[in-house]
Image: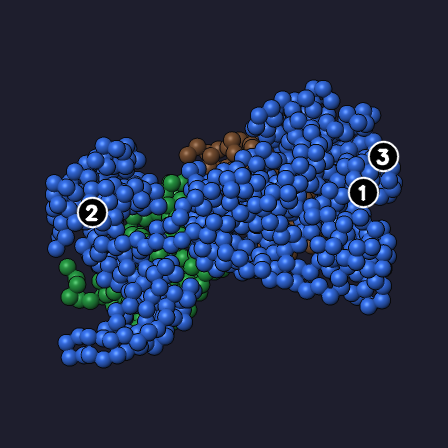
Chain colours: A brown, B green, C blue
């Protein structure tokens, strides 16, 4: 197993979603509010993982433009959950950089009153389990 | 323990009704959905043909697990057969449990003729359960041991 | 002791590739009772069968075990072969070493071992087999068709053509079904009513066909050749023999607020109504739930205006009991409910409609008299967006896993018709794939693009947002250009998935016909017996078996009719001899078996029982082998073990269990 394959496998494992179910309908991209900001569009994200092209995803702007609003997860007719794949790819990158956790007392300093509501909501969604 | 489980090849008897589950098993076959060779299928006209005696006999003769598959409730070819099965097997399984035969060794599953995937998944899962439970020693007739 | 021959089939490489066939032959030779064993590449072939026949004769075999494919496949073949060679056909058993062994296992050693065990079980069973004789049952020369759509009508016409009586039971007040709701049909664009109504008239005029409209099947008993069916003829409240179909009652009826089912609820109808102008029979029905007379007791306008005196408020439901030889299910389909698809705003906006609703809007007899207009403000639309695969090809619980098959084609038809009649309207179709397998289908779709310039965009729509100004903002994506598309549409048409009529589950249960996870009826064999249900005497016609367009439905309807005719042409049917049998010596007449028998096949009579030391008259169970279907419920219920099932006897089953556990 090459490194790329291993990484793609890891993303599938973290996300718990199955990109092979995708039928390339594009409903995720049609639903995405940050579509215009992204260089790799949500539906492409799924095929990149299928092709084990994780390196390109890790370098992409899309990774940090996804709002985790999960519109794509809700609407995907094939239950592929592209939003979770994006989240998992982010997780992978963060882990590689070795910053995958915070200490409780570090949080107040980091809290920014200007933080967009959407981010808080998505953080809740992501970490509730 | 895990090594012992690896080499342990359980004997599993599966009773399948002719109209739904046997056809489901055929579909699993023609779709090439594999499950362990430990499962041997006996065809019965209806799940209600399976006398609790057959299951006891299987355990007596050294079976490690018995699974009984029939049509989904309401879909029985003979209208009501699987309802009898459900009641009879509930009684039998609770008695077997009392005798010390673990509940995991016996099972009733509804598999329709269109559910090849379910059939194969059920068998894989069942064999896995039996492998974890190890050989059945409770009801085996010592005279039958070779 | 039996003399058993074992015949192991290679099935080309299907079995031989994973099972060491020679080794199986070698090992089964050692089994008790086996006097002959051989293998052959194709046992089911003419040459293979003649080998079996020859072995039966030369080796004087009394039992045969064939290790081959599933008994559901070739049991009948090998039993016939045995019969031709003078062996009782029920002395043949099949060990299924293909579907249950070679196809699912990869390891040759394991597969061979399992094949031997399966063969041993079959040999152990044959050792205890006894010759059985099939009985005979009579065939009622009359067929029942459930559902009066195009499938049901065509099946009934074809059966009647062959000279047999047919009854059609239709739930709604008129035959015609979904096809009567359509405006035009693809790929020729002829008018649906123009080609359907002659068939409807033909069905009602044919003296061999009886129509039971506004009726439902209530109870089914019996078996192939001899079904007894109760049909509930719901009270029409109109005397069919007196009504002239003048329609005055419908004009004068003061209750006019009931949603019109035929127009998919797009407008309303009166409480006394015929679903559509060409309805057959052209006799109205009083919808008692919405009739003022039935609800408050005060009204009776229809009775006053009816010159023929046909209105009968006292009419009651009637139960008709009839016997049939065969039953055809043709219950058709409906569109799925779209309440779970909030993103398409179907329930929020009246301008988001389903394709079947558009069909009614385009129809001259529809709610808008055929004018294309928005249902909210009756303005003609300028931009129409079609969305494909709404609920079809879904992996989640909101929709259906299958492709609905007809949507690609009817959407091309709608787009073309709209562009033809209103050239200034922009039509956009969002598609995932355009599937056009069928004669002249792809040409038809290409015409929509090339000739009518319909804008096909590859990509799905994410959301439809109703705007304050009444337009609908469609958020889509163009996957080929890789950009998001936003379209301000006036009308959005959803190609909703089709699903089997919700009543089919109830009907399938009554008929003991099996049904799949999507509520489609299962066929006896997906390729070779596509119009028969696994339950003998039940046949399938139309969409109740799977999504189909009109030509396919009509051809399947014809095929089902041929199968019915083939059955009705027989005077007698051979019955399954694997029936229950009571051992009078052991029976104590307790009635436990009769209580569990679903067919009422067990009765009791006083018989003289003679055995060494016993000579007395006892009350014992007697099985009517014509009624017994051989389920075996009684054998397990019997406390004294007197009841046994021939062909699957207790001893045989135990022998199989022992062989497997050996």
Q: Which residue is mark 1?
A: C367
Please, what secondary structure does the residue beneath circle 2 have?
A: loop
- The image position of residue C199, as x and y in percent, is 64, 38
Q: Earlier in the sequence, mark 1 or mark 3?
A: 1
Foreground disc of the pair 1, 2: 2
Please, what secondary structure does the residue beneath circle 3 have?
A: loop
- The image position of residue C442, as x and y in percent, is 61, 24
Determine whether C349 is above or below B59 in the image: above
Foreground disc of the pair 1, 3: 1
Residue A85 appears in the rendering: no
Q: Nearer the viewer, residue C154 or A17?
A: C154
Are discs 1 and 2 both within one chain? yes
Q: What whole-number distance in Å separates the C-alpha atoms at marks 1 and 3? A: 14 Å
- The image position of residue B54, as x and y in percent, is 28, 64
Residue C320 appears in the rendering: yes
Label 3 neighbourhood size at 10 Å, few (<14), some (14-19), many (20+)?
some
Q: Determine the chain carrying the residue at label 1.
A: C
Are discs 3 and 2 both within one chain? yes
Foreground disc of the pair 3, 2: 2
Q: Nearer the viewer, residue B17 or C530?
A: C530
Q: Which residue is mark 3?
A: C380
């Amino acid at each position: 197993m090459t490194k790329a394959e291993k990484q793609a496998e890891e993303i599938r494992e973290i996300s718990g979603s199955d990109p092979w179910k995708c039928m390339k309908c594009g409903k995720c991209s049609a639903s995405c509010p940050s579509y215009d900001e992204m260089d790799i569009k949500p539906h492409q994200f799924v095929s990149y993982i299928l092709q084990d092209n994780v390196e390109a995803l890790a370098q992409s702007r899309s990774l940090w433009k996804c709002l985790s609003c999960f519109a794509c997860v809700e609407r995907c007719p094939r239950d592929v959950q592209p939003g979770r794949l994006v989240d998992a790819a982010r997780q992978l990158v963060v882990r590689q950089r070795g910053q995958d956790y915070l200490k409780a007392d570090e949080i107040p300093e980091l809290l920014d009153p200007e933080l967009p509501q959407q981010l808080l909501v998505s953080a809740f969604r992501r970490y509730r389990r | 323990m895990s090594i012992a489980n690896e080499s342990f090849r359980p004997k599993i008897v599966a009773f399948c009704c002719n109209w739904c589950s046997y056809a489901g098993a055929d579909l699993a076959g023609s779709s090439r959905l594999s499950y362990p060779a430990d499962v041997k299928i006996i065809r019965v006209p209806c799940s209600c043909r399976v006398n609790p005696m057959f299951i006891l006999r299987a355990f007596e003769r050294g079976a490690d697990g018995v699974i009984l598959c029939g049509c989904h409730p309401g879909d029985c070819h003979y209208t009501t057969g699987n309802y009898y099965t459900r009641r009879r097997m509930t009684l039998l399984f609770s008695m077997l449990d009392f005798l010390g035969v673990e509940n995991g060794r016996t099972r009733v599953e509804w598999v329709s003729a269109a559910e090849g995937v379910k059939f194969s998944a059920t068998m894989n899962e069942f064999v896995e359960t039996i492998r974890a439970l190890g050989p059945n020693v409770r009801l085996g007739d010592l005279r039958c041991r070779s | 002791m039996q003399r058993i021959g074992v015949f192991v089939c290679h099935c080309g490489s299907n079995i031989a590739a994973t099972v060491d066939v020679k080794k199986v032959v070698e090992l089964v030779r050692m089994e008790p009772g086996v006097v002959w064993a051989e293998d052959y590449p194709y046992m089911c072939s003419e040459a293979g069968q003649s080998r079996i026949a020859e072995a039966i004769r030369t080796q004087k075999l009394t039992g045969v075990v064939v290790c081959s494919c599933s008994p559901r496949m070739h049991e009948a073949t090998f039993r016939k072969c045995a019969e031709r060679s003078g062996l009782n056909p029920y002395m043949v058993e099949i060990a299924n070493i293909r579907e249950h062994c070679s196809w699912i296992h990869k390891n040759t050693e394991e597969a061979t071992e399992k094949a031997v065990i399966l063969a041993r079980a079959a040999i152990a069973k044959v050792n205890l087999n006894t010759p059985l004789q099939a009985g005979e049952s009579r065939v009622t020369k009359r067929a029942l068709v459930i559902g009066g759509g195009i499938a049901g009508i065509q099946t009934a016409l074809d059966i009647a053509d062959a000279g047999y009586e047919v009854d059609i039971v239709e739930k709604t007040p008129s035959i015609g079904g979904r096809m009567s709701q359509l405006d035009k049909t693809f790929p020729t664009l002829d008018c649906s009513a123009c080609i359907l109504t002659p068939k409807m008239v033909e069905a009602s005029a044919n003296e061999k066909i009886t129509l039971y409209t506004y009726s439902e099947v209530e109870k089914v008993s019996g078996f192939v050749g001899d079904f007894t069916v109760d049909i509930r003829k719901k009270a029409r409240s109109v005397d069919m023999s007196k009504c002239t179909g003048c329609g005055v009652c419908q004009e004068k009826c003061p209750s006019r607020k009931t949603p019109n089912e035929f127009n998919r609820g797009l407008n309303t109808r009166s409480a006394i109504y015929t679903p559509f102008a060409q309805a057959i029979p052209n006799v109205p029905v009083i919808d008692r739930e919405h009739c003022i007379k039935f609800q408050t007791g005060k009204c009776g306008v229809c009775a006053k205006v009816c010159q023929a005196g046909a209105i009968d408020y006292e009419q009651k439901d009637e139960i008709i009991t009839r016997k049939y030889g065969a039953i055809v299910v043709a219950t058709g389909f409906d569109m799925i409910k779209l309440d779970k698809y909030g993103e398409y705003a179907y329930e929020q906006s009246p301008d988001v409609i389903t394709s079947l609703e558009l069909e009614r809007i385009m129809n001259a007899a529809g709610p808008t008299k055929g004018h294309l207009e928005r249902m909210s403000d009756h303005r003609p639309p300028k931009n129409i967006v079609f969305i494909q695969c709404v609920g079809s090809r879904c992996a989640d619980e909101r929709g259906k896993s299958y492709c609905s098959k007809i949507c690609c084609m009817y959407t091309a038809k709608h787009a073309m018709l709209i562009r033809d009649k209103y050239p200034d309207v922009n039509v956009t179709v969002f598609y995932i794939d355009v599937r056009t397998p069928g004669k002249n289908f792809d040409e038809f779709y290409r015409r929509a693009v090339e000739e009518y310039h319909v804008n096909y965009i590859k990509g799905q729509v994410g959301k439809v947002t109703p705007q304050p100004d009444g337009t609908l903002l469609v958020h889509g994506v163009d996957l080929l250009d890789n950009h998001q598309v936003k379209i301000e549409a006036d009308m959005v048409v959803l190609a909703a998935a089709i699903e089997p009529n919700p009543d089919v589950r109830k009907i399938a249960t009554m008929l003991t016909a099996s049904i799949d996870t999507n509520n489609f009826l299962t066929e006896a064999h997906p390729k070779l017996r596509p119009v028969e249900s696994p339950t003998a005497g039940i046949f399938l016609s139309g969409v109740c078996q799977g999504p189909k367009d009109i030509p396919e439905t009509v051809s399947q309807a014809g095929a089902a009719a041929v199968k019915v005719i083939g059955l009705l042409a027989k005077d007698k049917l051979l019955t399954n001899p694997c029936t229950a049998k009571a051992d009078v010596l052991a029976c104590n007449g307790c009635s436990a078996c009769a209580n569990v028998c679903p067919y009422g096949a067990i009765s009791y009579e006083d018989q003289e029982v003679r055995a060494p030391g016993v000579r007395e008259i006892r009350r014992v169970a007697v099985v009517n082998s014509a009624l017994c279907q051989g389920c075996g419920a009684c054998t397990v219920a019997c406390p004294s073990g007197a009841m046994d099932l021939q062909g699957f006897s207790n001893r045989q089953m135990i022998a199989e269990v022992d062989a497997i556990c050996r």
